[in-house]
Image: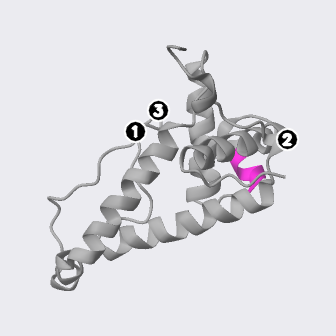
Amino acid sequence: MVLFDVSRYETPNPKDVNLANTKHNVSVFMAAYLSSRSRVGQPREPKVTQSFSLIPPSTTKHTFEAEQILIDSEDAKEEFIYLHKLFIKGYSAIQHPFKPDVTERRKKIFYDRYIRGLPIYVTAQHANISEEMVSQESAGCIVQFASALELVSFK
């Protein structure tokens, strides 16, 4: 018996993935997640630290009466909690096994491209890297995110 089953934790190679279908699957998830954030009175974009670690959503902020009505909806809260846990699982899967600086860069690229919706050239300027590097890292981080949520579509 093997102590650690590598196949259970391997991320697929982006070359073996149907990137268009995988991006579509992630976009469907992200649309559901971001709209659920709005329904419970959270800002559209999850808050992150300077090193792109997630900050838990605040439940103590003051809300307007209309927002409170939305927050009181149990279905909206349950859906948000479910989707937020999935988002955390996917976001935390964006890693480089040996280089923490690459992990941080990948998370920044994912955040800028797929949460903030910035184009490649703006993301490249923010990260101070080439547009080609942003394209490569984008493919890698979306596959890592999608793999954690079982959203990968293979060729």
Residue 3 in the image: above or below residue 65: above
- Inspect the magenta stretch and tell me whether residue 52 lies in it: no
Q: In the image shown, does 30 or 62 lie closer to the viewer?
A: 30
Q: Residue at x 21, y 86 (%)?
A: 66
* Amino acid type at image mark 1: Thr
Q: Can residue 9 be seen in this view?
A: no
Q: What element carries label 3?
A: loop
Coloring scheme used? one colour
| Residue that label 1 marks | 49
* CA–CA distance in space, label 2 to label 3: 29 Å
CB atoms at circles 3 and 1 under 8 Å apart? yes
Q: Which residue is drawn at 66% across and 35% down?
A: 11
* Amino acid type at image mark 3: Ser
Q: Can residue 113 be seen in this view?
A: yes
| Residue that label 3 marks | 51
* CA–CA distance in space, label 1 to label 2: 32 Å
Q: What stretch is highlighted in magenta?
A: 119-124
Question: In the shown orientation, is residue 133 left or right of residue 140?
Answer: right
* Amino acid type at image mark 2: Lys
Q: Residue 15 carries which label?
A: 2
